[in-house]
């Protein structure tokens, strides 16, 4: 096995401590670190609608997937954030994308992966921004929960989360799937297990953050050892889930997980989508990002003066980038301390 320079520089983690840590009413992060974003105005007047976006930053490029409308994929030079090209074609034809997703690649042959949830097809994007078909991951339409929760582990292995964290193993022309960890909470069975998954193959860790419960689970890639951070303990707002527009009325806790080799960033709302919508109409923009190490220890919490479910981290610049749908020029960059 060839060990990359990045892996050699990583400090070896102590063993993950199993069990549940109750944090309700506590403040493990200390005071919030308030950050003002730097709004990037696109110099070549490239305009697009960042609808349901997902993005990664890799090798001097930011690659963005758009779930509807424009796209399916845009490439920008980073950190300048100038538009490079539109990659792929949206449509129902061969090698076209219906529901596109960009995800980080741990295969050195590809800058990143593209996945089309409509056809379950996986593609690799090389350093010349050319697309190569890799594999059809599912014989039938893949679950819609995979859209934001498919992660690459190595050239032959992927993980995704819906009702459980599931491993996809590719062996020649055969694709195997195996559920390795159930996500339904024992004391909130009426609540969907919706959330966000993040994977760190370099440190043998993954993390799952729940959308409708203030709970985060850290575990190894086999889910043999699980550490649960429970900020909520036992009270869950399950009654609103049976109402019309119930999910919009329920508080959204965690929105997205941004894994890096030595830490994980988790975006946090703490209010309902209806409350966010009403604030945006009044030009009130803010959200939170919690930072943890990969053993589940809270490190700090940032309060950003922007709101978005689409966020990426650049390790070279130590920056967070948000893509905000309410701006014509949607990129907002935050310098981290």
Image (cartoon, rainbow, N blue to C red):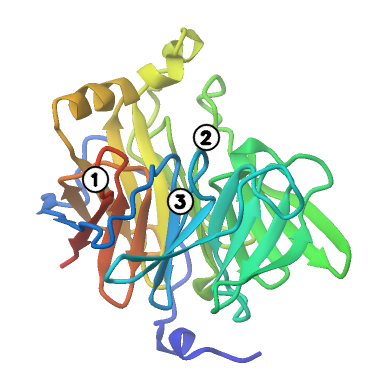
Q: Mark 2 vs mark 3: give the one in front.
A: 3
Residue 71 percent coordinates (x, y):
51, 50
Please tell me whether mark 3 sits on a helix, a strand or a loop: strand
Q: Position of residue 43 (x, y in %)?
A: 23, 62
Quick one: SS at disc 2? loop
- Determine which quarter of the picture holds residue 314: bottom left
* Point 55% across, 19% down: residue: 190
Is residue 197 positioned above or below 7 on the image?
Answer: above
Q: Do the residues labelled 3 and 1 touch (CB within 8 Å)?
A: no
The vertical placement of 134 against 252, above or below, is below
Residue 220 location in percent, x, y? 56, 62
Q: What element carries label 1?
A: strand
Q: In this view, does 28 lie to the left or right of 235?
A: left
Which residue shows up at 44% across the image and 57% down it? 55
Looking at the image, is mark 3 or mark 1 earlier in the sequence? 3
Q: How crowded is mark 3: few (under 14 residues within 10 Å), some or many (20 or more)?
A: many
- Judging by the rendered image, the residue that carries numbered circle 2 is 194
Q: Distance between the residues labelled 3 and 1?
A: 18 Å
| Residue at the spot 48% in from the left edge and 84% down from the top edge | 7
Label of residue 318 in the image? none
Q: Residue at x 66, y 90 (%)?
A: 1
Q: Is residue 309 left or right of residue 337?
A: right
Q: Is residue 10 above or below residue 124?
A: below
- Residue furthest to the right in view is 173
């Amino acid at each position: 096995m060839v060990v990359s320079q990045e892996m050699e520089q990583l400090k070896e983690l102590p063993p993950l401590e199993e069990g549940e840590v109750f944090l309700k009413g506590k403040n493990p992060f200390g005071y919030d670190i308030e950050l003002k974003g730097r709004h990037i105005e696109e110099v070549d007047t490239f305009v697009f609608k960042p609808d349901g976006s997902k993005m990664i930053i890799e090798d001097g490029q930011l690659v963005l997937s758009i779930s509807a409308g424009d796209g399916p994929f845009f490439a920008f030079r980073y950190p300048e954030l100038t538009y490079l090209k539109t990659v792929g074609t949206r449509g129902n034809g061969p090698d076209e994308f219906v529901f596109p997703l960009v995800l980080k690649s741990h295969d050195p042959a590809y800058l990143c992966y593209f996945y089309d949830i409509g056809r379950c097809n996986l593609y690799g994007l090389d350093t010349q921004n050319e697309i190569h078909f890799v594999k059809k991951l599912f014989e039938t339409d893949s679950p819609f929960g995979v859209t934001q929760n498919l992660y690459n582990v190595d050239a032959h292995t992927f993980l995704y989360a819906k009702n459980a964290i599931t491993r996809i193993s590719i062996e020649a022309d055969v694709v195997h799937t195996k559920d390795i960890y159930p996500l339904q909470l024992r004391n909130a069975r009426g609540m969907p297990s919706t959330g966000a998954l993040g994977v760190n193959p370099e440190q043998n860790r993954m993390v799952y953050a729940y959308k409708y419960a203030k709970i985060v689970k850290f575990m190894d890639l086999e889910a043999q050892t699980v550490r649960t951070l429970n900020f909520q303990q036992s009270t869950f707002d399950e009654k609103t889930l049976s109402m019309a527009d119930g999910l919009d009325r329920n508080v959204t806790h965690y929105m997205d997980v941004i894994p890096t080799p030595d830490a994980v960033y988790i975006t946090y709302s703490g209010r309902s989508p209806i409350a966010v919508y009403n604030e945006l109409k009044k030009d009130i923009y803010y959200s939170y990002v919690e930072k943890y190490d990969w053993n589940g220890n809270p490190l700090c919490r940032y309060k950003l003066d922007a709101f978005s479910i689409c966020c990426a981290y650049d390790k070279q610049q130590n920056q967070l980038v948000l893509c905000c749908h309410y701006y014509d020029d949607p990129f907002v960059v935050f310098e981290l301390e």
